[in-house]
Image (cartoon, rainbow, N blue to C red):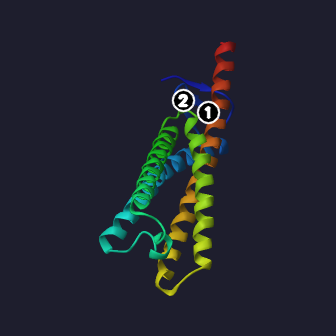
Amino acid sequence: MHFLEISDNTVLQTNGIVSNSPEAVKFRRNSSTLRILGAGVIIYGFWSVIKVIAYVVLGIPLYSAADIENLGEITIDFLLAVLAVLMAGDVIVRLIIGIFAWIEGRRQDKRAPGFYLVFTVWEILFCIFSVYSVIAQFLTLSNDTFIEVYVSLFMELTSLVILIEVYIAALSVRRYKKRLAKKLKEMSACS
């Protein structure tokens, strides 16, 4: 391992940063945040699947009879198939976001591919719509679904906050890694 002195307060290691400067501390904190929240995104990805399984096991209908009274059986089956595909897609996208956020936070020397940030923005927009729909459901609340809507609202808001935190931490870590790579390049050019 080679160590290079950049300034009086920063020591640079060729495969990462070892320092107590405020910038390096913030980088390590954001890297740790990405690792932890990456796991959180994955867990929230499976939340929707667990929720539907719990509905089925507990005998809670996924839809009200009034909503489907004018629909045929084939249409209902089609809508349930579309729901299953959307849920699988959501889980896969959250897995991608969570795994690459964890990789981004774990690797101190290189950046992870940036396409997961596009998925993160997509999920943030999807979560905003989901929070809006839960709030709309809350406004038309009946007494038997009161606790369920509160739990759903809490889970959706938490998921939204986690995704926003992942995006902010990833941008901060990427900016720092870019500056670090630039410093290394300048130092190697001077040598």
Residue 112 placement (x, y as % from top left): 53, 33
* Residue 47 visible in this rendered orientation of the protein: no
The image quadrant of residue 189 is top right
Q: Residue at x 39, y 72 (%)?
A: 61
Residue 156, x across and y down, in percent? 54, 64
Q: Which mark is residue 80?
A: none
Front residue (pair 171, 9): 171
Q: Amino acid at mark 1?
A: Lys
Q: Amino acid at mark 2?
A: Lys
Q: Nearer the viewer, residue 109 or 151?
A: 151
Mark 2 and mark 1 lie on one chain; the one further toward the N terminus is 2
**Any mark on residue 110, and which?**
2
Q: Give the secondary structure at mark 1.
A: helix
Q: Which mark, by number, is residue 177?
A: 1
Where is residue 41? Give x, y as percent. Answer: 48, 52
Residue drawn at (41%, 53%) of the image: 81
Q: Which of the pair 121/191 is nearer the observer?
A: 121
Query: Which residue sits at x=52%, y=27%?
Result: 15
Quadrant occupied by the C terminus: top right
**In the image, is 121 to the left or to the right of 47?**
right
Image vertical order of residue 5 relative to residue 45, above or below:
above
Q: CA distance from mark 2 to mark 1?
A: 7 Å
Dot 2 alpha-carbon crowd within 10 angstroms: few under 14, some 14 to 19, many 20 or more: some
Q: Work out whether residue 126 can be spotted.
A: yes
Seen in the picture, residue 78 relative to 14 is either above or below; the reply is below
> Which residue, as the protein is rendered here, is positioned at the far left?
57
Of 8 and 65, nearer the camera is: 65
Q: Under tag 2, what secondary structure?
A: loop
Marks 2,1: beta carbons within 8 A: yes
Whether residue 135 is situated above or below residue 73 in the rendered picture: below
* Callout count: 2
Q: Position of residue 46 (x, y in %)?
A: 41, 56
